[in-house]
Amino acid sequence: ARHGVHAELVGKFTADEHSTMPTERPNIVDMIHAGEIDMVINIALAKEGKFDQVEDEIRAVRAEIPAGKVLKVIIETCYLDDEQKRQATAAVVRAEADFVKTSTGFGTGGATPDDVRRLASKLEEMWPGL
């Protein structure tokens, strides 16, 4: 990045998406120039409790990102119940994303302090001493 400015690319998943991969995938050329890639999990799969498929989709995106690029995964906490938030966080960790994020800010509500504590608790459970 020049002059401390970093490019970030956001991949699109819609809340009602039922396919196994996003319909609008980032162009590989864009990914090469972006320092960070943000993606939103497939909310429909998460609501259905299909966290293995959520994990598979994250892994598929991770596999397409050039080495050294950061993958941030947004779980959109406003759409999930407490257990779904914990399971989504676990799927992000297992898929080897670099960051788990709570919200895009475009859903029905933003992240709450309880959401942050819940995600932190799950991360601590998966990585004691974090």
Image: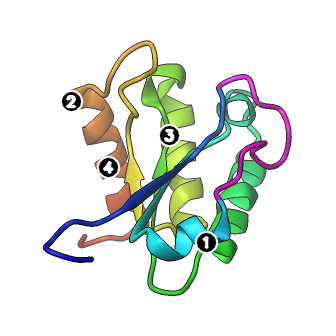
Query: Considering only vertical position in the picture, is 58 above or below 51?
Result: below
The residue at 72%/29% (across/down) is: 44
Q: Secondary structure at mark 1?
A: helix
Q: Amino acid at mark 2?
A: Pro
Q: Amino acid at mark 3?
A: Ile
Q: Which mark is residue 75?
A: 3
User: Mark 3 to mark 1: distance in Å?
Assistant: 26 Å
Residue under pointer 4: 121
Residue under pointer 1: 29
Camera-side mark, 4 or 2: 2
Query: Considering only vertical position in the picture, is 70 above or below 46?
Result: below
Q: Amino acid at mark 1?
A: Val
Q: Are circles 3 and 4 on residues that touch, CB within 8 Å?
A: no
In the image, the segment drawn in magenta is 15-26
Tell me which label, 3 or 2, sits earlier in the chain.
3
Q: Is residue 99 left or right of residue 30?
A: left
Neighbor class of circle 1 (other Cα within 10 Å; few <14, some 14-19, many 20+) is few
Tell me which label, 1 or 2, sits earlier in the chain.
1
Residue lying at the far bottom of the rendered structure: 67
The residue at 14%/74% (across/down) is: 3
Q: In the picture, residue 13 is in which quadrant? A: top right
Tell me which label, 3 or 4, sits earlier in the chain.
3
Query: Considering only vertical position in the picture, is 62 above or below 46?
Result: below
Q: Is residue 33 magenta?
A: no
Camera-side mark, 3 or 4: 3
The residue at 39%/34% (across/down) is: 103
- How far across and how far down the image is residue 107, in percent? 46, 20
Tell me which label, 3 or 1, sits earlier in the chain.
1
- How far across and how far down the image is residue 92, in percent? 54, 57
The residue at 32%/32% (across/down) is: 115
